Amino acid sequence: MADSHGMSLNNVEICKISTPINGAEYARLTVADTGGGIHKEIRKDLFKQFFTTKGSGGTGLGLWLTRDIMHRNGGRLRFRSRTESPSGTVFVMYLPSTPVAQQDAGKVQSREERVAAAS
């Protein structure tokens, strides 16, 4: 499926992971494209609030918000990218099959604890 940027999504996969991560089962959502990849210079900024490579066409909230929602709910968001041929980017979201409240048996983590745990 091609989009307006001329890249094509060649892999969208949803599956339940049978091997537990950190003692819990996760569903995995993988999205891969065949675009030009994400240059190394900007990878460190990808998840920063208001960071965009789309100029006035982007808000810089998409990846930042997605990662924040994932972390708040005990999930993880990872990516890998290649700018050399064959180029492209893969994002993988890990969503816990058990709600965070049930995993932690009522323990509420601060934002700092969640960020530290995700690192």
Image (cartoon, rainbow, N blue to C red):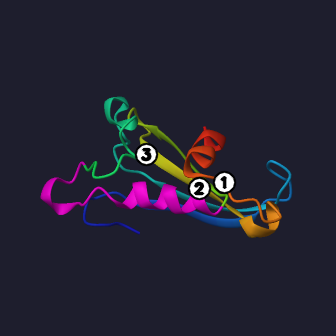
The residue type indicated by label 3 comes to: Gly
Residue 43 shown left or right of residue 107 in the figure: left
Instruction: Give the residue type at disc 2.
Output: His
Per the image, the residue denoted by label 3 is 88
**Disc with the residue nearer the chain's start (3 vs 2):** 2
In this orientation, does residue 97 appear? Answer: no
Relative side of 24 to 117, left or right:
right
**Which residue is drawn at the image coordinates 41% and 69% (left, top)?**
1
Residue occupying the point 15% across, 53% down? 55
Magenta-span inclusion, residue 99: no
Q: Which mark is residue 109?
A: 1
Q: Is residue 88 above or below residue 101?
A: above
The residue that disc 2 covers is: 71
Residue closer to the observer: 3 or 59: 59
**Disc 3 versus disc 2: nearer the observer:** 2
Query: Could you tell me what secondary structure mostly forms the magenta stretch?
Result: helix
